[in-house]
Amino acid sequence: MFVLFFAVWVLLNGKLNWEIAAFGVVICAGLYLFCCKFMHYSPKRDWETLKKLPRLLSLFFVLVREIFKAGFALLPFIYTRREPDPVIARFRTDRVRSDTGRVFLANCITMTPGTITGSLKDGEYLVHCLDRSMAEGLDSSCFVEKLERWEGK
């Protein structure tokens, strides 16, 4: 987290010299200590996140791939003016157990064109899909598999 704070500090300053770096280290260390004390953050949590980074990057590349696939699936609706068959799908998945994983899944669904997660309550998702074909397999999508691996199962 400290490295992330420092990287943002350098980016926002636009240049790097020893004064900016020294001041940034002090500011970022203070911010990191604040997060540890008042936001129940710990260096152990940083280490756990770093260990999961390859899986998180894998999830990111799957998300990008699915965004492109869904974008191409929407082209017939745009260019042929084919009428979509919108549907609201409900599904529950017990494969993603953590709250963070569930929120990641909801956000992945929302970032994919043609689908929007309307609600997530007690592990049940309510998703609006532009077409009925987009609602198929939401509960066993590649996002669920990647998040299951990310959680370490």
Image (tube, grey):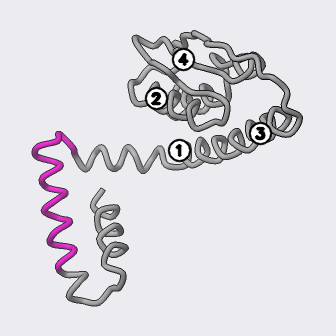
Query: Callout 3, which amino acid?
Result: Lys
Q: Secondary structure at mark 1?
A: helix
Q: Nearer the viewer, mark 1 or mark 3?
A: 3
- Magenta-colored span: 23-41
Which of the labelled discs sits on residue 69, or is there none? 3
CA distance for labels 2 and 1: 11 Å
Residue at 66% x, 21% y is 129
Q: Which residue is mark 1?
A: 56
Q: Is residue 13 left or right of residue 134?
A: left
Q: Are marks 4 and 1 in contact (CB under 8 Å)?
A: no
Residue 29 magenta-highlighted: yes
The local crowd at label 3, few if under 14, some if 14 to 19, many if 20 or more residues have their Cα within 10 Å, is few
Residue 120, placed above or below residue 61: above
Q: Which residue is mark 2?
A: 101
Query: Callout 4, which amino acid?
Result: Arg
Residue 32 magenta-highlighted: yes
Q: Quadrant of the N terminus?
A: bottom left
